């Protein structure tokens, strides 16, 4: 997956860019004052749908459903001046199919500072919720100091899905008054109603914690004195990946084009996979029972030609010519399944960037 850039659109002349910078600097104090009133704040929310669609079309291989569904949901939500509830999306699919990449693109094309925006918040259960025995503390029944980390892509890579917490991330400690998930989310929404919350690896999250988010995901006007209806919540997991793979495999065996697979075929199997998985954060959750998720977004398994696309993208990012022997070597080193058909990449495009240097 290519590195996140805004290369899909022209920045205009240098003078124009300098004028924009000067204007932004002059308006900074006024914007900061305006953003102290969280209900009306747009902060650094600067949606660029043209850039997003361009980047998805160029670099997100094999995901016609995810691409169309995400763009449609985002446009409808952002263009609504008074949404009745936050936008809540749950991304599902096999490893390396582009879930983290898409979430990174959303941050990049929705906020001026992308993943480094103070209004983009990324959670990982391994980092933030590592001890199931302390779940009540994480919920807010006793103290726990949180950290807000803004993460950004470094380098490049075809379908390179960044580790959310790695060297190069910029973290800011939160005040002791914001000690738990509920009050932390509430505090950030009070600062700016246009906030993006990314919850990674939901299939590794102890069930129960997400229940504290239920009041924020529904259609009430305010929660705990905070207007939250313009927030966006993204949940990411591999749960449902096997079921999605099976649907794709059956379609291939029936000689159906991949693009003929419809969302209606996948939603029930994804929902069932989540409900049946006791390790998923939504297991026995009111969030599922009350249908607070606006969309289950499926990511299909990647075939050989999709992996080839990722290799070519990565070579282009490295400024290298697309040498056939390098592309073929990467493909030959990739494991495919099922054993008989050898149809889908076992790691999607996740390891493409790390494999290329071995064959240059």
Image (spheres, grey):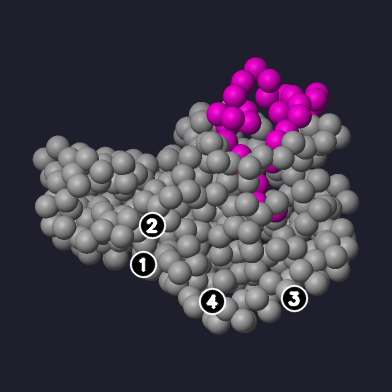
Magenta residues span: 119-148
Does 40 appear in magenta?
Answer: no
Query: Does label 4 or label 2 sit earlier along the sequence?
Result: 2
Q: Is residue 218 visible?
A: yes
Left or right of 17 on screen, residue 32? right
Q: Please, what secondary structure does the residue beneath circle 2 have?
A: loop
For the view shown, which residue lies furthest in the top direction?
133
Which mark, residue 113? none
Residue displayed at 54% across by 76% down: 11
Which mark, residue 23? 3
Quarter of the image with the N terminus is: bottom left
* Label 3 packing within 10 angstroms: few (<14), some (14-19), many (20+): few
Disc 4 from disc 1: Cα separation: 19 Å
Residue displayed at 12% across by 52% down: 325
Which residue bears the numbered disc 2? 2
Task: Kindly report which numbered mark, 1 or 2, lies closer to the viewer in this rendering.
Answer: 2
Q: Please, what secondary structure does the residue beneath circle 3 have?
A: helix
Disc 3 from disc 4: Cα separation: 16 Å
Which residue bears the numbered disc 1? 58
Disc 2 from disc 3: Cα separation: 31 Å
Which residue bears the numbered disc 4? 11
Foreground of the two, 150 or 261: 150
């Amino acid at each position: 997956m290519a590195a996140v850039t805004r290369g899909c659109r022209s920045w205009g002349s240098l003078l124009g860019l300098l004028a924009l910078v000067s204007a932004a600097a002059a308006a900074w104090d006024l914007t900061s004052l305006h953003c102290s009133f969280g209900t009306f704040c747009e902060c650094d929310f600067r949606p660029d749908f043209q850039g997003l669609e361009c980047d998805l079309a160029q670099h997100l291989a094999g995901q016609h459903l995810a691409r169309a569904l995400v763009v449609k949901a985002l446009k409808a939500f952002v263009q609504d001046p008074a949404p009745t509830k936050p936008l809540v999306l749950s991304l599902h699919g096999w490893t390396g199919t582009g879930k983290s990449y898409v979430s990174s693109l959303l941050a990049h094309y929705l906020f001026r500072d992308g993943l480094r925006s103070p209004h983009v918040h990324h959670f990982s259960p391994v980092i933030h919720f590592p001890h199931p025995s302390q779940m009540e503390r994480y919920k807010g029944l006793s103290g726990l100091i949180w950290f807000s980390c803004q993460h950004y892509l470094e380098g490049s890579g075809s379908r390179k899905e960044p580790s959310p917490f790695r060297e190069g991330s910029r973290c800011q400690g939160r005040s002791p008054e914001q000690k738990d998930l509920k009050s932390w989310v509430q505090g950030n929404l009070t600062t700016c109603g246009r906030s993006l919350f990314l919850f990674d690896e939901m299939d590794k999250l102890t069930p129960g914690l997400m229940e504290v988010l239920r009041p924020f995901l529904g259609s009430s006007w305010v929660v705990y004195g905070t207007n939250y209806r313009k927030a966006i919540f993204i949940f990411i997991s591999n749960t449902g990946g096997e079921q999605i793979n099976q649907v794709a495999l059956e379609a291939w065996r029936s000689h159906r084009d991949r693009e003929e697979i419809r969302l209606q075929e996948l939603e029930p199997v994804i929902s069932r996979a989540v409900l049946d998985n006791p390790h998923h954060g939504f297991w026995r959750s009111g969030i599922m029972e009350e249908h607070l998720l606006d969309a289950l977004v499926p990511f299909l398994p990647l075939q050989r030609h999709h992996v080839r696309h990722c290799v070519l993208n990565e070579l282009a990012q490295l400024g290298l010519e697309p040498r056939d022997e390098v592309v073929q070597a990467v493909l030959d080193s990739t494991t495919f399944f099922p054993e008989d058909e050898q149809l889908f990449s076992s790691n999607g495009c996740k390891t493409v960037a790390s494999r290329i240097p071995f064959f240059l």
